[in-house]
Image (tube, rainbow, N blue to C red):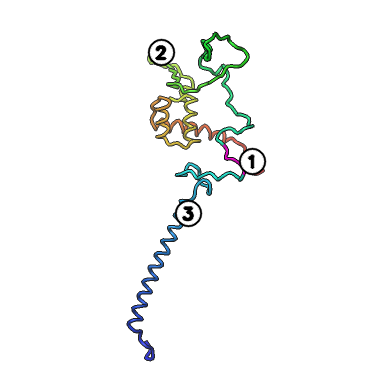
Amino acid sequence: MTPDATPPCANCQRLQAQLDALQARFEVLEATVAQLQRQLAAARKDSSNSSKPPSSDLVKPPKPPPPPGQDRRKPGGQPGHRAHQRELFPPEMLASAPTDYLLDACPSCGGHLLLSDAAEPIVAQRVDIAAVPLEIHEHRSHPGWCPHCRKECYAPLPLSIERGGLAGPRLTTVIAYLKGACHASYSTIRKFVRDVIGLTISRGQLCKIVGKVSRALERPRAYAPDFSGI
């Protein structure tokens, strides 16, 4: 402090301290308000005003009102819209003969009914999963005794059976699809195979099956022509 400088008075020092405290508190409140504004903006985002998927909406956003003079559309097909219906499965895919239902009498007057050919019957098809969708085949290699060599020898199994392992082609395809296309874990695949297909299989066996498919898919890539220089 220079000799000519006047020392601040006690009241000025007290006011400066209060100002510094208020400034610090203002900065804290300002940061809190900014954080709350960011949280509020994030909470207001849904599938209608951002790129978030509809499944992430806690509450579905209200639908915008229709334009003036236009009524709100009812759910389902609109008047004049051609109906799109699932095509029926062909007869060769049916697991059993169709079940026919006939009326014994007219539901209105109780009179006798004649079978009408004027209209086609209403067809309802139902698709379900078989109770145990497993097809198990057993392959046996019987031994033979050679008196000359004095040893047993077994008949060779087909190469597809010997190298195929436990899972057949269709089951191998399902497991590889779940792992590759669906990105399912081995635990999830194991539960699906056990609970849906009805087969208990170890994680190690699943790893072998997926590895076999991966190696089979790598072979065509190894012999694929290189077009990078074209």
Residue most extreme to the right: 230
Residue 217 position within the rendered picture, expressed as x and y whole percent measured from the top left:
53, 33
Q: Badge 3: how crowded within 10 Å, few (<14), some, or many (20+)?
A: few
User: Magenta span has 71?
Assistant: yes
- Which is nearer the eye, 152 or 181? 181
Mark pair 2, 1: CA separation:
54 Å
Residue 205, numbered label: none
Is most of the magenta stretch helix, strand or loop?
Answer: loop
At label 2, which amino acid type do we have? Answer: Gly
Q: Quadrant of the N terminus?
A: bottom left
Kindly check if marks 2 and 1 are in contact, taking CB atoms under 8 A apart as contact. Answer: no
On screen, residue 79 above or below 108: below
Residue 227, numbered label: 1
At label 3, which amino acid type do we have? Answer: Ala
User: Magenta span has 105?
Assistant: no
The residue pinned by badge 2 equals 144
Q: First in sequence, mark 3 or 1: give its number.
A: 3
The residue pinned by badge 3 equals 41
Q: Badge 2: how crowded within 10 Å, few (<14), some, or many (20+)?
A: few
Q: Secondary structure at mark 2?
A: strand
Residue 130 position within the rendered picture, expressed as x and y whole percent measured from the top left:
45, 21
Q: Residue at x 62, y 32 (%)?
A: 79
Front: mark 2 or 3 = 3
Q: Secondary structure at mark 1?
A: loop
Magenta residues, as a range? 69-73
Q: First in sequence, mark 2 or 1: give its number.
A: 2
Is residue 82 among the parts visible in the rendering? yes
Front: mark 2 or 1 = 1
